[in-house]
Image: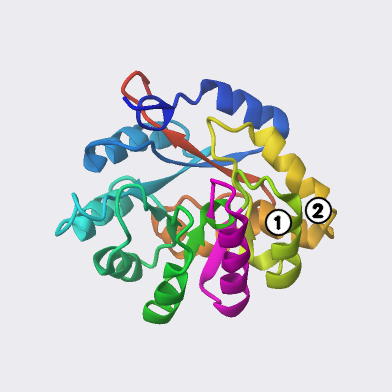
C-alpha cells in the first residue's frame, strides 16, 4: 500500500463516468500486484460478470513471473478469454519471454515504458510480428522529449502504437496524429483515476474526420485484438468507443 496504484482501483465511479461519456467497452487489467496470477483471476471474474462490457489483459511481471509467462498467458487466453498482455517498466523491463508469449498467442502487448522509449527500437526490430501499444504517448510524467521520440517510432515502425491516456500537452498529441496517422493512436482513459470523459474531450478536440476519429476511439483496438477476440468469442459490435481501466478486486464481488 504505497499509493492508489497498488492498493485499490474500484470501478464504480469510473463506470458511471464512462457510461455518461458514451464509452461502451472497457479494457481491464490489474493494478500493481504482488501476484499477477491471483490478480488476473480477480480481473477475470469482473470480465466474466459483464462480457458485453469488458475485455481483459493479462498482467505479467518480467522478473517474478520469469519461466512461467507462457503458462500465465495461456491460462488468461484460454480460460479467461483475455485479449492482450500488460507489462509495466515500474515492475521491470520487458523480456524476450514476454514477447515470445505474445507472438505465440498473437496478442498485442500494452507496455508502459515509463519514458524509456528507446526500447521501442529494439522491440520493433526483434519482434516485427508483435504489436506493441505504448501508453501515455510514452510518458505519464509528461516528459515531452520522450513523447516526441515516441512519435518518431510511431512513424517509422508499423508495429508500434500509442495511447492517449494522460497526455497533457495537446500539441504533442496533435503532432503524433498528424505525423504517424490516426491508425497508430488508441484512445485510453487510465481509469479509474483519470476521468474518461475528460480524456475523450481531447480526442474530440482534434476535430478529425469521422473515419479517423473512429479509428482512435475503437477500430484500431479491435483490429489489434482481432485474432484473440475471435478465439475467445468476445468480438463486439463495431463503432463502439473502447477505453481502458485498471482494477483490483479484493473488495469487489463480481
Q: In x, y percent, where is residue 144? A: 62, 56
Q: Which residue is mark 1?
A: 173
Q: From the viewer's side, name the closer residue of 166 and 110.
A: 166
Circles 1 and 2 in contact, beta carbons < 8 Å: yes
Left or right, 118 with reference to 168: left
Which quadrant does the C terminus fall into? top left
Which of pointers 1 and 2 lies earlier in the amino acid sequence? 1
Q: Does dot 1 land on a helix, a strand or a loop?
A: helix
The verdict on residue 156 being magenta is: yes
Q: From the viewer's side, name the closer residue of 58 and 5.
A: 5
The verdict on residue 182 being magenta is: no
The reply to whether residue 225 is visible in this rendering is no
Single out the mark in the foreground, 1 or 2: 1
Q: Residue at x 69, y 60 (%)?
A: 215
Q: In x, y percent, where is residue 87? A: 36, 53
The reply to whether residue 227 is visible in this rendering is yes
Q: CA distance from mark 1 to mark 2?
A: 9 Å
Q: Which residue is mark 2?
A: 206
Q: Does dot 2 land on a helix, a strand or a loop?
A: loop
Q: Residue at x 72, y 71 (%)?
A: 179
Q: In x, y percent, where is residue 108? A: 44, 62
Does 93 appear above or below 15? below
Q: Residue at x 46, y 65 (%)?
A: 132
The quadrant where residue 98 appears: bottom left
Which quadrant does the N terminus fall into? top left
Q: Residue at x 70, y 56 (%)?
A: 173
Q: From the viewer's side, name the closer residue of 88 and 210.
A: 88
Q: Which residues are magenta?
A: 139-163
Q: In x, y percent, where is residue 106? A: 38, 68
Amino acid at each position: 500500500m504505497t499509493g492508489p496504484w497498488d492498493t485499490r482501483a474500484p470501478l464504480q465511479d469510473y463506470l458511471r463516468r464512462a457510461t455518461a461519456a458514451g464509452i461502451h467497452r472497457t479494457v481491464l487489467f490489474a493494478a500493481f500486484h504482488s501476484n499477477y496470477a491471483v490478480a488476473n483471476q480477480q480481473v477475470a471474474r469482473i470480465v466474466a460478470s459483464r462480457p458485453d462490457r469488458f475485455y481483459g489483459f493479462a498482467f505479467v511481471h518480467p522478473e517474478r513471473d520469469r519461466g512461467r509467462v507462457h503458462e500465465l498467458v495461456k491460462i488468461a487466453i484460454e480460460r479467461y478469454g483475455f485479449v492482450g498482455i500488460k507489462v509495466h517498466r515500474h515492475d521491470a523491463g520487458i523480456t524476450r519471454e514476454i514477447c515470445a508469449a505474445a507472438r505465440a498467442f498473437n496478442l498485442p502487448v500494452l507496455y508502459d515504458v515509463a519514458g524509456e522509449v528507446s526500447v521501442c527500437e529494439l522491440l520493433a526490430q526483434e519482434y516485427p510480428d508483435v504489436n506493441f501499444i505504448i501508453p501515455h504517448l510514452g510518458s505519464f510524467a509528461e516528459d515531452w522529449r520522450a513523447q516526441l521520440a515516441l512519435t518518431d517510432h510511431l512513424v517509422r515502425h508499423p508495429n508500434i502504437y500509442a495511447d492517449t491516456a494522460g497526455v497533457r500537452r495537446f500539441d504533442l498529441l496533435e503532432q503524433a496524429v498528424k505525423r504517424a496517422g490516426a491508425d497508430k493512436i488508441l484512445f485510453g482513459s487510465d481509469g479509474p483515476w483519470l476521468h474518461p470523459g475528460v480524456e475523450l474531450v481531447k480526442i474530440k478536440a482534434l476535430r478529425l474526420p469521422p473515419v479517423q476519429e473512429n479509428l482512435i476511439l475503437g477500430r484500431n483496438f479491435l483490429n489489434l485484438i482481432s485474432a484473440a477476440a475471435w478465439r475467445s468469442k468476445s468480438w463486439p459490435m463495431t463503432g463502439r468507443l473502447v477505453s481502458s481501466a485498471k482494477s483490483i478486486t479484493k473488495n469487489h464481488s463480481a
